[in-house]
Image (spheres, rainbow, N blue to C red):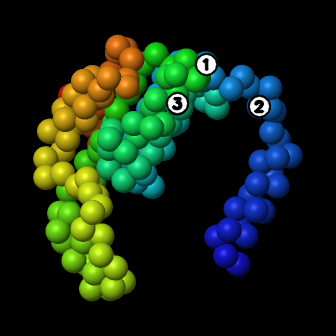
């Protein structure tokens, strides 16, 4: 059985108990969370979120520049008025450079991706500082509270940066 088939079976059970169909489109807590796609992070559990509470934008590294389009939609069309940015310990983005990944893709896939920035970072705390600053300085982002954290994958704790 494929993982997709497992998902289909699990969804049937979920649907049988589903009672959230009347939630409004805008997130109830008017917050956007930008975090990494790392499978060890469950933002809802870690932050005490329920369905309908927040927009959660995930990408490799939880990078703000990649999330900007979604943040803009979240604020302008759906009324969010706070941003929480979370990077995490033991992040894969700390393990490579653009050059390393570009060379790997050229070698293995025979494709040139020199025009792509994969947005890795060498310093975890600095990456949070830079991403918060990017959002704060962007003319596309409303003047709202923006808070950065580091999530510890070993303990589940968030630490404010």
The image quarter in which residue 120 lies: bottom left
Please, what secondary structure does the residue beneath circle 2 have? loop
Pinpoint residue 23: horizontal percent, then vertical percent.
74, 25
Q: Badge 3 local density, few (<14 within 10 Å), some, or many (20+)?
A: few
Please tell me the numbered disc located at residue 73: 3
Please, what secondary structure does the residue beneath circle 1 have? loop
Query: Which quadrant, please, contains the N terminus?
Result: bottom right
Q: Badge 1 local density, few (<14 within 10 Å), some, or many (20+)?
A: some
Asked whether disc 1 touches disc 2, contact meaning CB atoms under 8 Å apart, the reply is no
Query: Which quadrant, please, contains the C terminus?
Result: top left
Q: Which residue is mark 2?
A: 20
Pinpoint residue 136: horizontal percent, then vertical percent.
27, 23
Can residue 29 be seen here? The reply is no
**Residue at far right of view:** 16
Q: Is residue 98 left or right of residue 141?
A: left
Mark toward the start of the polypeptide (2 vs 3): 2
Q: Which residue is mark 1?
A: 28
Depth check, mark 2 against mark 3: the one in front is 3
Question: Residue drawn 49% across and 22% down?
Answer: 75
Pinpoint residue 70: horizontal percent, then vertical percent.
48, 36
How far is mark 1 from mark 3, CA to CA? 16 Å
Q: Badge 2 local density, few (<14 within 10 Å), some, or many (20+)?
A: few
Could you say which is closer to the camera, residue 75 or residue 161? 75
The image quarter in which residue 133 lies: top left
Question: Residue drawn 25% across and 48% down?
Answer: 89
Mark toward the start of the polypeptide (1 vs 2): 2
Could you say which is closer to the camera, residue 79 or residue 51? 79
Please, what secondary structure does the residue beneath circle 3 have? helix
């Amino acid at each position: 059985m494929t993982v997709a088939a497992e998902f289909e079976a699990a969804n049937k059970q979920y649907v049988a108990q589903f009672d959230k169909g009347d939630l409004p489109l805008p997130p109830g807590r008017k917050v956007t969370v930008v975090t990494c796609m790392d499978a060890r992070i469950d933002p809802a559990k870690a932050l005490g979120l329920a369905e309908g509470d927040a927009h959660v934008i995930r990408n490799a590294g939880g990078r703000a520049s990649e999330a900007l389009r979604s943040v803009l939609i979240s604020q302008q069309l759906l009324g969010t008025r706070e941003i929480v940015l979370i990077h995490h310990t033991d992040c894969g983005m700390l393990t490579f450079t653009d050059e390393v990944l570009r060379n790997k893709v050229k070698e293995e896939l025979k494709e040139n991706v020199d025009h792509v920035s994969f947005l890795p970072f060498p310093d975890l705390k600095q990456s949070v500082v830079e991403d918060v600053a990017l959002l704060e300085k962007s003319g596309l982002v409303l003047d709202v509270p923006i808070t950065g954290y580091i999530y510890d994958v070993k303990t589940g704790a968030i630490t404010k940066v």
